Amino acid sequence: MKKKIVLGVIGADCHAVGNKVLDFALTEAGFEVVNIGVLSSQEDFINAAIETDASAIIVSSLYGHGEIDCRGLREKCEEAGLKDILLYAGGNLVVGKQDWEPVRKRFQEMGFDRVYPPGTPPEVDIEHLKEDLKI
């Protein structure tokens, strides 16, 4: 049975190209992708994950406000009964040029399992998903 992944672009971000690339790569790798598209709220991600019984949520953001948009997502997932769901985030998650390690650390402190810098190839996410989902 294919593992279901909810994929989307969070907040007021309308960057769609990376989303389409990830959708294609994840589908090709054998995952069932539920792509909620751009301009998605935390609630959109959570509702899609509940409705589809997803194993992971992958949040992307390119406009630099991902850190603000993602704050509290883990807590909302837990409140909604998604205690064990994997949370991944990637893209241009913060404004300006910041060292990556502190950014990664802040997202992990917010409850994200994996955090990816801009330009990370989809193969890296796929490898981590297979490892984290024990596929």
Image: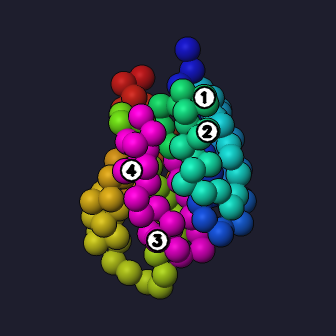
Q: Secondary structure at mark 1?
A: helix
Q: Residue at x 46, y 61 (%)?
A: 70
Q: Amino acid at mark 4?
A: Arg
Specify the color scheme. Answer: rainbow
Q: Secondary structure at mark 3?
A: helix
Q: Residue at x 65, y 68 (%)?
A: 13
Magenta highlight on residue 78: yes
Residue density around tag 3, few if under 14, some if 14–19, many if 20 or more, within 10 Å: few
Give yes or no for contact between labels 3 and 1 (Cβ–Cβ under 8 Å).
no
Residue picked out by circle 4: 74
Cα gap from disc 2 to disc 4, whole angstroms: 15 Å
- Sequence order check: which comes first, mark 3 or mark 1? 1
Cα gap from disc 3 to disc 1, whole angstroms: 26 Å
Residue picked out by circle 3: 68
Residue picked out by circle 2: 48
Farthest residue, direction bottom: 96
Farthest residue, direction front: 79
